[in-house]
Amino acid sequence: MSRIEATLAAIKASQRKALIPYITAGDPHPSHTVGLMHALVAGGADIIELGVPFSDPMADGPTIQLACERALVHNTSLWNCCAMVAEFRKTDGRTPVVLMGYLNPIETRGLEAFCQLAKDSGVDGVLIVDLAVEEAPDFAPKVRSFGLDLIFLLAPTSSDARIAAIAREASGYLYYVSLKGVTGSAALDIDSVSEKLAQIRLHTDLPLAVGFGIRDAESAAKVGSVADGVVVGSALVSQIEKHQHTPEVLPELLMAQLHGMRVALDALQASPEPALA
């Protein structure tokens, strides 16, 4: 059982909801990333998604695009990201880490070389935004042979056939994108999310995490009432952008921001009713 599977199984057994924060590696500077990862754990993170900076992050809105630009100014590479995870692992052997990014940097280095380095660094899973499920039969077995989970995105427009195909290739958890659009989009329709998650659950027993549109404790609780986990990214990255010139304050700020969401999600255990607006 992978570290991701074990973590999510324990969360389910305790009737909790997974809190999965995202930050971009190297933002605002590579020297701060590991400290921010530890701050996220202190704030209540169950799994960390660490973004791999890319020059053309087509699924991401302006907030994360700018984070990638800030990281790339300091030449933050895929290999640097793995080194950050290795450093994180020196004092945290429990929290799963997922690298989230795009296919090009992996193909540039070579899939096998990447998988070996990721495994050696303590990475637990990869989420490759632009990896089509049609390519997965050639890609997924290699990733899994190194003990890494391969996590896929599902969208509001995903058909039953595509959901089934992705479910066959995925491991760890499935990431449902709650909105049509890019990261940082505004509107969030919990009823629609609930309906789509019910459709997805017909095809898989994997935990379902929901991201895009989650900004604060209230929206986290709403999503957590219908999902197995909540992914928050742009709200945290916005905080990093705001304080990029005073990075020493960021660990405390991110920890407090995430802690509010953790408290809201944990409160769902005491309430059998969905926290719908």
Image (cartoon, rainbow, N blue to C red):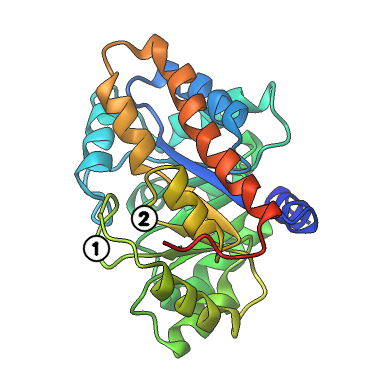
Rendering quarter of residue 206: bottom right
Q: Secondary structure at mark 2?
A: loop
Residue at the spot 58% in from the left edge and 24% down from the top edge: 38
Task: Name the kind of residue labelled 1 in the image.
Answer: Gly
**Mark seen at residue 275:** none
Residue wearing tag 2: 212
Left or right placement of residue 149 versus residue 221 in this view: right
Q: Is residue 62 left or right of residue 1?
A: left
Q: Residue at x 27, y 49 (%)?
A: 184
Image position, residue 50 (x, y; %): 47, 39
The answer to whether the residue labelled 1 contacts the one labelled 2, judged by CB atoms less than 8 Å apart, is: yes
The disc, 1 or 2, on the residue closer to the chain's N-terminal end is 1
Secondary structure of the residue carrying numbered label 1: loop
- Left or right side of 271 for 19: left
Q: Nearer the viewer, residue 167 or 207?
A: 207
Q: Position of residue 253 (x, y in %)?
A: 43, 21
Q: Which residue is mark 1?
A: 181
Taking the spot 46% from the left edge, 89% from the top edge, the residue there is 161
- Does residue 212 appear left or right of residue 142 in this picture? left
Vertical order, 170 against 126 (above or below)? below
Residue 117 appearing in the image = no
Please state the horizontal and vertical placement of residue 84, each as a whole percent of the image: 52, 27
Q: Amino acid at mark 2?
A: Phe
Mark yes or no: residue 213 visible.
Answer: yes
Q: Is 191 rendered above or below residue 160? A: above
- Mark 1 is surrounded, within 10 Å at the Cα level, by few (under 14), some (14 to 19) or many (20 or more) other residues, namely some
What residue do we see at 65% from left, 37% from top?
122
* Residue 75 image-quadrant placement: top left
Q: Badge 2, how many Cα within 10 Å: few under 14, some, many 20+?
A: many
Quadrant that contains the N terminus = bottom right
Name the quarter where the C terminus is drawn. bottom left
Residue sitting nearer the eye, 34 or 56 = 34
